[in-house]
Image (cartoon, rainbow, N blue to C red):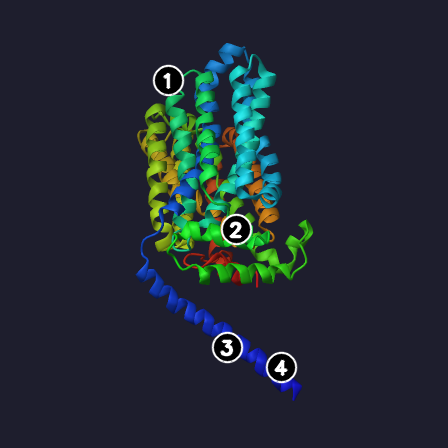
Amino acid sequence: MKMEIKEDVEGGKQRGVREALLGENNKQLVNETKHHHHPWMVYFTTFIAVCGSYEFGACIGYSSPTQEAIRKDLSLSLAEYSLFGSILTFGAMIGAITSGPIADFVGRKGAMRVSSAFCIAGWLVIYFSKGPVPLNIGRLATGYGMGVFSFVVPVFVAEIAPKELRGALTTINQLMIITAVSVSFIIGTVLSWRALAIIGLIPTAMLLFGLFFIPESPRWLAKKGCAKDFVAALQILRGKDADISQEAAEIQDYITSLELLAKPKMLDLFQRRYLRSLTIGIGLMICQQFGGINGVSFYTSSIFDLAGFPSSTGTIIYAILQIIITGIGAALIDKAGRKPLLLVSGSGLVAGCIFTAVAFYLKVHNVGLGAVPTLAVIGILVYIGSFSIGMGAVPWVMMSEIFPVNIKGQAGSIATLVNWFAAWLCSYTFNFFMSWSSYGTFILYAAINALAILFIVVVVPETKGKSLEQLQAAINA
């Protein structure tokens, strides 16, 4: 008898949950037709957060236009300047390892403040540098800040955004990074290297000022048990007249269910419960970097030169194309979905690599030399256009979506660290590969991108249109 009652109660519970979810979908349709506007506060908060992304791009874009001037002014050897260029990535790796724990401990806004402080200190040290040692210390500090930003900005934006805008708003992170790289490249040809370092302070100043006017992530506040602050932050983000009861209840219920689990340690992330989300997060970061993007972007000019196409023209076309197509990707991501964009992107990357490989093959064997510049330019532009539509932004969008809030700090740190290590490895090995075989390098990248397509088809789920709680529960079931 007891058994039957228990089954009735459990059955009733499950029915209730099912009905609640069905009811939720119906209510959602009514709400979406009733409130089709989105409060300006979500957009304003995103804008402030992505000043961190712009700072990230400014750090990356600094070393390319300033190389000759810094070497001349400070009498640096090529080896000393190469260390200055690459130490940024090591700073970013340290930033990546610590970003999750910092964002969990002091909050998402607190982590952005820490990151800004390192960037400001770094730029000032670079500005006042009289030799290689302070220059490298400054570069390491900006790298650290950049590593923290690379994790905390997409996570913060995903946690504040309504589900139907989450993909587009999180993609602005990538759009700001590449815009900043391009702007640094252009203004760096006009300004002195010290002036360019001072300009690097502007985005962090805007971010630090703006943080006073935006709310903390409601999901982080809920996880910390700050119930009043959590509801207040969510209300500010959704607008003062919006009905947030349903969204607040869903977030609170999910966090309560996570609290019943033991606090995960680093090794617990590899348990079956979390293994799928960790595989997706790390796998996408590996696909993004090992497909050759850093090698191609760092050495665009030399690839154009090798192919016999004017490198200045090629680089400008490359930069403009990257910004435009990332913008198109941001507009499509919540309509088309994450997975279709990744598949289109992966296919284009394979095609771009094959075009470039054919160009270098013809050049090496002195066959059809007239076609080489055209093929190389088509290959590089197809490659960067394809990267920008999906593989550039979507791995960061999905990393910010798939990890439950109780493991987000640790798991996100691991994924971000893997990304930075893979980025360093790709740029470090690119010249060795090119001296081994220029066309062989691009055939290798084509093969890796083909494997990435297979990984996306088999492993990666679609996350558009679901709340973070719904999709995390589904992935980590």
The numbered mark, 1 or 4, whose residue comes first in the sequence reads 4
Q: What residue sits right under mark 2 in the picture?
A: 229
Residue drawn where x is 58% and y is 13% of the image: 131
- Image coordinates of residue 215 in percent, x first then y, are 47, 45
Cα gap from disc 4 to disc 3, whole angstroms: 14 Å
Front-lying residue, 477 or 440: 477
Question: What kind of residue is marked 1?
Answer: Val
- Image coordinates of residue 19 in percent, x first then y, are 46, 74
Residue 352 lies in what quarter of the image?
Answer: top left
Front-lying residue, 333 or 368: 333
How busy is the neighbourhood of tag 1: few (under 14 within 10 Å), some, or many (20 plus)?
few
Give the structural element (helix, strand or loop) at label 2: helix
Label 1 vs label 4, nearer the camera: 4
Cα gap from disc 2 to disc 3, whole angstroms: 32 Å
Q: What residue sits right under mark 1 in the picture?
A: 190
How busy is the neighbourhood of tag 4: few (under 14 within 10 Å), some, or many (20 plus)?
few
Residue 383 lies in what quarter of the image?
Answer: top left
Cα gap from disc 1 to disc 3, whole angstroms: 67 Å
Q: Is residue 97 left or right of residue 237?
A: right
Give the structural element (helix, strand or loop) at label 4: helix
Question: What kind of residue is marked 4?
Answer: Lys
- Image coordinates of residue 96 in percent, x first then y, are 58, 39
Residues marked 4 and 3 touching at CB (< 8 Å)? no
Q: Residue furthest bottom?
A: 1
Q: What residue sits right under mark 4 in the picture?
A: 6
- Image coordinates of residue 161 in percent, x first then y, are 43, 50
Residue drawn where x is 31% and y is 29% of the image: 370
Confirm whether residue 426 shows in the render.
no
The numbered mark, 4 or 3, whose residue comes first in the sequence reads 4
Label 1 vs label 3, nearer the camera: 3
Residues marked 1 and 3 touching at CB (< 8 Å)? no
Give the structural element (helix, strand or loop) at label 1: loop
